[in-house]
Amino acid sequence: MIREDTWTVEIFLSEDEGETRADAMLRCGAGQEVLASGVARCDPDDYDIPEIGAEVAASRALAELARKLRRTAADDIQTVTGTRARVHP
């Protein structure tokens, strides 16, 4: 049996005075949402290029989202098997 599903990630970016924040929201099965955030700060000695701040902040938000998904998977495995589980990156 083939099972297909679509999960969607939206990333919301905001920038203020050299700090960029990214909020990532994953919408997955059964209306479940997983939220994660990442921040990038521009060093005062660096060029202030908003696109780079957005890339860094978004990558940090996505990394946090991945960490949360691994934790959820490990918890689900433990619930099903009764054995402590760890999902490696």
Image (cartoon, grey):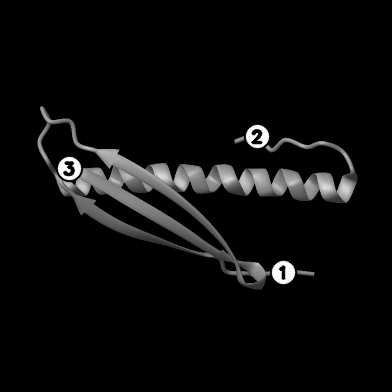
Circle 2 packing at 10 Å, graded few (<14), some (14-19), many (20+), is: few
- Residue drawn at 15 percent across, 46 percent down: 17
Label 3 element class:
loop
Residue 66: image x %, image y %?
54, 46
Three-letter amino acid code of the residue under disc 1:
Arg
Tag 2–tag 1 contact (CB < 8 Å): no
Looking at the rendered structure, which numbered label has been put on residue 88? Answer: 2
Residue closer to the observer: 72 or 8: 72
Camera-near label (2 vs 1) is 2
Of the numbered discs 2 and 3, the one sitting upstream in the chain is 3
Tag 1–tag 3 contact (CB < 8 Å): no
Q: Which residue is the site of mark 1?
A: 3
Looking at the rendered structure, which numbered label has been put on residue 33? Answer: none
Mark 2 and mark 3: span between their CA atoms?
Answer: 34 Å
Three-letter amino acid code of the residue under disc 2:
His
- Residue drawn at 39 percent across, 55 percent down: 23
